[in-house]
Amino acid sequence: MSSIKQVINDAVEKVRQPNPIRLRDLIRQIRSAKTAAEERAVVNRECAYIRLTFREEDSVWRCRNVAKLLYIHMLGYPAHFGQMECLKLIASPRFTDKRIGYLGAMLLLDERQDVHLLITNSLKNDLNSSTQFVQGLALCTLGAIASPEMSRDLAGEVERLLKSSNAYIRKKAAVCALRIICRVPELMEMYLPATRSLLSEKNHGVLITGVTLITEMCRQSPDMLAHFKKIVPNLVRILKNLIMAGYSPEHDVQGVSDPFLQVKILKLLRILGCGDSEASETMNDILAQVATNTESSKNVGNAILYETVLSIMDIKSESGLRVLAINILGRFLLNADKNIRYVALNTLLRVVHADNSAVQRHRSTILECLKDADISIRRRAMELCFALINGNNIRTMMKELLTFLEKAEPEFKASCSSKCVLAAEKYSPNVRWHIDTLLKVVEAAGNHVPDDVVSSTIQLISETRTEQAYAVGELWRHLSIAQMEYQPMIQVATWCIGEFGDLLLSGHADVTVVESELIDIYQKILWSSQCSITTKEYALTSLMKLSARLTHEIGSIQQVVSAFGSHLNIELQQRGIEYSQLFTRHNHMRGPLLERMPPFEGTRAGTEQDKATITNGVDTPLDNESLLNDLTSPNNNAHETSESNALLDLLGGMEPGDSDTIKSTSTSISLTVASTPSVNADILDLLGGLDSGPAASVPTTNMNEAPPTQLPNSSNAAYLLDGLLNNSTPIISSPSSPVTNSAGTIPTSNSIYPLVLQKSSIPGITAYDKNGIRLDMAFELQETLITINLIASNNTGAQVTDFLFQAAVPKVPLRMRIKLSWLANGSPVQDQGEISNFPSALWQ
Amino acid sequence: MQFMLLFSRQGKLRLQKWYEAHPDKVKKKITRELISTILARKPKMSSFLEWKDLKIVYKRYASLYFCCAIEQQDNELLTLEVIHRYVELLDKYFGSVCELDIIFNFEKAYFMLDELMVGGEVCETSKKNVLKAIAAQDLLQEVSYGDTAYEL
C-alpha cells in the first residue's frame, strides 16, 4: 500500500517538477542550433538552470548536471562553478557519481587550482576502498593531476597499493608512482623496494608500467641507474620470451607480440647500456635478434625496429651492429610510407657524424628524398646531404643540391645557399668549378641569398687571376638575360664587369660584346624600379670603373653619371656628383684612380664574418658600406675598437709594462688632404684623429669615407695606418670630400684618391712643441693635392697614453686649428692652438 | 604523452585530455593553433610535425583527427600504434564507432582512454583486459542506481 503511494507521489512530483533534461537531449539541442547565437542561448539557459540546482544542493541529479556541464565546457564555455560539485560527487558513495566526479576533476581541476587540494581526502578514502574500480578511479585521477603537495600526502598510499595482490591495482599504482616521483623526486627512494618484484610479473600491464617506472627512475637519478644495471639480464630474458613465444591473441598486434612492451624494454635497455660497455655487451645479441627478426612490412614492426636502431646507436655496440642499424634506416628510406621515411631521415641526421661512412652508402636514396612531396622530409634530406658531402662526392651532390635550391621554398633558400657556399669552400676540386658553383648558387637562390654569399663570390673572383676572364664572361651572359628583381646576381655581375670590363671587351672572355651593349644594360639596371638602391650603388660605381676601361662610350657614361646628381636618394646623388667631378675637374686622375684593385685579403664567408641573413631585396642605407667594410677589413666590426687597437699599436712604446720608459717613440700618420685653390672647392673635413677612448666619435656624416684598414702584418706596428674619423667640427661648413688614407693595403672602391707618397721638395715644419710633445709635419704636393705626414714624439720621459689629436682646417689661407689631449702618467693634459706656419709653397 | 586532442574536420573539439597543467587560456590557444595547423596539412604529408619543443603525431580516422603531443625522446611510430589501439577499443565497445558515438557518449570515450592510459603512459596492453574492465564498471554503474533509472 505504502509503496503504491510512494510511486504515485513520485509520479506527481515528476510531473510537477520536471527532471533536468538528459545529457544526450542537451547535446542534441545544442547541435541543432543553427547559429552561434542560438547555441549560446541554449547553453546559457542550461547553465543558469544548472547553477540553480547546484545552489539547491540537489544530490539526485547532480551527476547528470555535472555531465552536461562538462560537455558545455568542451565546447569552450566557462565551467568553473562546477568545480565544487565535482568534489561533492567524488564524496558520494554511488559509483556513477564518482565516475563523473573524477572525470570532472580531471577536466576542470588541475594542479594549479587551489581547489584541487580539497579532493585529497576523498582520494585517500577511495584509495582504500574495497572496490577495485573505485581505487582505480582514484589512482587514475591522481596520476593525471597530482601536484607536489598532493603527491606528498598520498605517496604512502600509492606505495602500499604497489604491493597489492591485485594486478589491476598494481599497474595503475605503478604509473601513479611515476607521476609522483616526477613531481617530487625525493620520494623516489620510497618506491625502490616495490619495484624489485615488478619485473617478475606475468601480467603485461604490470610489466609495462613497471618498466616505465624504472625508466623514469633511471633517467632522474644516476644512483638509481647504477642500481638497476643488474636487471639487464632480466630485461633481455623478457624481451626474448616476447619474441620467441608463440602467438598470443591477447597481446598481438598484426603479428607482433605486445609491441608496446617491447618498445618500452628497448628504451630501458638503451638507458642502461648508454656508456656502459659491460651492459651493452649483454644486450648485443638480443638487439641483433630483434633487428633481424622483426617483420617490417607494417608500421608496428617498424616502430620496434626504429626503437632498436635508436638503442643500438646510443649504447656501446660493436660496429657490425651499428652497420646493421644504419642499413635498417636505409631500408626505411625506401619504404613507401612517408612516416617511416621521415623517421629514418631524422635518425640518420643524428648519427651521420658518428658513422659517416656507413651512411654514405645510402647517399643516392637520400638524394632522391630531396624531391619528396613532404616539406619536412625535404628539409631533413637537405641537411643530411650537407652532412654527407666530402671531397669525393662533391660534384654529384652539388649538382643535386643546386637543382633542389632552384625549386626550394624561400625559407630554405637562404640556409641552403650559404651551406652550399661553405661546402664549395671546403671541397672544391678546382677554382673554375668553385666559381661556377658560386655563380649558380647566386642565380638559383634569387633574392634569398645571405649577404656573405655575395661578398664571398666577389672575393673569390678577385683572388683568382686566371679565372677572371671566364668569370666575367659568364656573368655577362647571365646579366644580359637576368631578371631585374634578383639583386645578388646583378650585384656580383656589375662588380665583376666593372673591374674586368676590359677582359670582356678584348675578347678574352669568349664573348663578343660591344661597348654600347654594356652601356645599355647599365642603363637598364640603373633606371629599373625593381633594382634596389644597393644594386644601383654597385652599378654606378662599376660604371665609373668602366669609364677607365672603355674607349668610345665615355660620353654616355658621363651623361648617365651626372644624371644621378639629382637623384632623390642621398647616397646615389652624392656618388653621382662626386663621380661627375672625376670627369670634369679631376679628369686626369680618373684613370689611375679606377685601376683594377689588388686581390682582396681576408677570410671569406663561413669563417668569422658576420652571417647576417639579410635578403637582398631589402634596402638599408649603409648596406653597401658594411658590405665593403667586410670585404676590405675582415676583422673590422667596429670602427672604434679597431681604432683603439691601432692606437695601442701606435703607442706601442708607451704602453704600461714597457721596460723602456724613456723611449721617445714616434708615430706617423699619413693624412691625405685634398685642397684646391678655388673657393668653392670641397675642403676636406678630415680629422685624422687618433682616438683611443671609448668616446670615439662615430663617423656618420660622410657616407663616402673609407673604412679603417688594418695592417696585414704587425711588424710595422710603429707605422700606423689608421682609418678616418670624421670629427665634424663646427668650424667646417662645406660638404666634405672623400678622403682616404691607405698605405699599401686595400683601397676600397669608395676611395677615389689613390695614395701617392713621394719625396717632396717642400720643407717640413715643427707644428707644435710644448709639454714634451712635439709634432713635426712633412709635406708633399702634387698639383692640387697636399699630403701631410705628421710625426708626434713623446719627449716627456714619462708614459703618455690616450693621445688624441684633432685638427680642423678652415678655408684658405692654409691654417690648421689643432686640439691635443693626452694622459701623462695618468694626469690629463690638454692643449689647443693653431698652426699657421705652413710653407707658402703649399698654397701657391 | 603531454596531451591528446580529438577534433572534427570542421575544427570542432570532441575530446581533450591534458596530462600537463596549463591555464585554461593557454589550453585554448594551443588547441586553436594545433587544429588550424593540422587541418591545413595536405594528405600527402607525413603524420608527424614539430611544434614548439614537442612532437605532434596525428592520424585521421574518417571525419575525426586524433592528435597527440609527445616528448622528444618518445617513439612517434609507436604513438601511431597507441592511437590505433584506442580507436580499436572504441570500435569494439560501440560497435563500428563513428564520430556521432563519440559526441553523444563523450564521457565513455574518456573512460576508455583512462583505462588505456594513466598519466600519459600506456598501462594496459591487452585489449581484452581493457574491455573487461570497462564492462565491469558499466555494470557497477547500473547497479549503483538500483531501481530508479538515473541515467545521465
Image: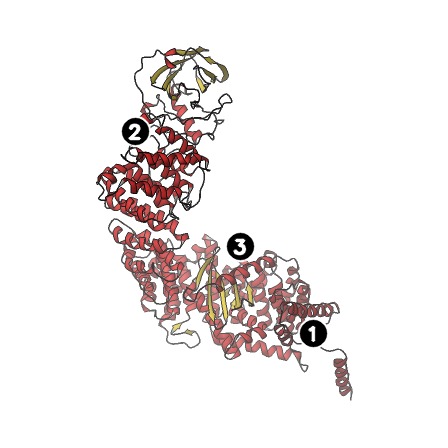
**Could you tell me if the residues under marks 3 and 1 are in contact, i.e. CB atoms within 8 Å?**
no
Decide if residue A589 is on the left or right side of residue A822: left
Number of other residues with Cα within 10 Å of mark 1, as a class: few under 14, some 14 to 19, many 20 or more = many
User: Contact, CB < 8 Å: mark 1 with mark 2?
Assistant: no
Label 3 vs label 2: CA separation? 79 Å
Considering only order in the chain, which callout, 1 or 3, is on the residue closer to the N terminus? 1
- Percent position (x, y) of residue A194? 50, 63
- Can you say whether A87 is above or below A509 in the image? below
Label 2, on which residue? A591
Residue at the bottom extreme of this rendering = A1
Q: What residue do we see at 55% from left, 61% from top?
A: B32
- x and y, in percent, of residue A834 in the image: 47, 13
Give the class, few, some or many, for how many residues have Cα within 10 Å of label 3's Cα (few <14, many ≥20): some
Q: Is residue A460 above or below residue A757?
A: below
- In which quadrant of the rendered view does residue A487 lie? top left
Residue A754 in view here: yes
Q: Quadrant of residue A233?
A: bottom left
Q: Amino acid at mark 2?
A: Gly
Q: Foreground: B29 or A618?
A: A618
Closest to the camera, between mark 3 and mark 1, is 1
Chain at tag 2: A
Q: Amino acid at mark 3?
A: Pro
Please name the residue that numbered disc 3 is placed on: A185
Question: Do tag 3 and tag 2 residues touch (Cβ < 8 Å)?
Answer: no
Q: Which residue is mark 1?
A: A61
Q: CA distance from mark 3 to mark 1?
A: 41 Å
